[in-house]
Amino acid sequence: MRNKTISALMAAILVMTCLTGCGKSGEPRGSGDPVTAGGQTEPAAPETDEEEESDSDTAEEPTADAATPVVYMTTDISSEGLMAIYEALGASPTGNIAVKLSTGEPGSNYLRTDLIGELVQSLEATIVECNTAYGGSRTNTAMHYQVAEDHGYTAIADVDIMDAERSLTLPVEGGDNLTENYVGSHFENYDYYVILSHFKGHAMAGYGGAIKNISIGIASSEGKAHIHSGGTGGSMWGGDQDAFLESMAEAGKSVVDALEGNILYINVMNRLSVDCDCDGNPAEPDMHDIGILASFDPVAVDQACVDLVYAAEDGESLVNRIESRNGLHTLEQAERIGLGSREYQLVSIDG
């Protein structure tokens, strides 16, 4: 994959997050000049005549075109910040609204209700999840509802374990590994999906964000096994790694295709452990919290999160987790099959 500078991204986030760039792999990429919440390029300071003359032969920094997806960002990781980032999208969901999140294993870094409760209730949404395909506290519906209650989710909204009544089959178009994706059968009961993801590391995928939440997350327990096997139906744990990563992108695209645009994505970058919320004993995070990002493009919002991790002084552990699992390949496949764009404009809504 061609190298891509992230200098424009780093310039945009230095003030916001007090990060310095590390450029560890050269792989992550973003594009576009820093822009304000109004979507306009931030104006440069006025130039003197001497500056104009000296710069006359200098090529201008390329800017992202109107087709480049916008990723909004705030460093305010609070209920108010989450509401603000959602409102920045200007979305108008109607009908039966689902908020898809990970209920998380007991002891994990799942999203807390004091952070997400106001947003969920403002949407009058149902929290939706699917059962896991491994041993744990959420492997069957009764146990899963108990975890949802223990984590406070049933106190803020109705909770629907979507594969309580088995699976629904979605076609996969343009995939290299999957031709079908098996999601919870209640998937079709909702008109609009708000994909609310805790961005973090993952023991198998390298990282987990929006793409994982719409693929593994919306897949039924049998669908999860199908994706993990790379579509072969074989072992969840011993299959080809790249086929698994590609299958996540392919399954995610089947979900997006089925929803025909009735979906948005919010990634919360706090408690940035190398381990997923499916791990009840995750490694303690050794990097700082970063912020909340939102977009209508799942690839763009995940790529922006990855770029922020790579730009962080203390992101080495999570970068190593991503690279050791070839996690960036999910983004490569997702862009290649048309799930979204790895190019984006980062827009701060702070101040």
Image (cartoon, rainbow, N blue to C red):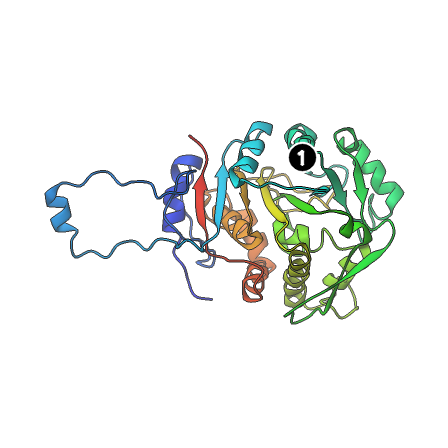
In depth, the one of 46 and 122 nearer the eye is 122
Instruction: Residue 75: give x, y in percent of width and height.
Output: 50, 34
Q: Quadrant of the C terminus?
A: top left
117 relative position to 38: left or right: right
- Neighbor class of circle 1 (other Cα within 10 Å; few <14, some 14-19, many 20+) is some
Residue that mark 1 sits on: 123
Give residue 40's quadrant in the image.
top left
Instruction: Residue 224: give x, y in percent of width and height.
Output: 76, 57
Instruction: Residue 333: give x, y in percent of width and height.
Output: 58, 65
In depth, the one of 33 and 231 nearer the eye is 33
Residue 97 visible, this angle: yes
Instruction: Residue 60: give x, y in percent of width and height.
Output: 26, 54
Residue 208 visible, this angle: no
155 relative position to 254: left or right: right
Identify the residue at image location x=64%, y=49%: 262
Q: Residue furthest front?
A: 95
- 149 in relation to 211, above or below: above
Identify the residue at image location x=79%, y=35%: 158
Identify the residue at image location x=58%, y=37%: 270
Identify the element where label 1 is drawn: loop
Name the kind of residue labelled 1 in the image: Leu
Identify the residue at image location x=74%, y=39%: 127
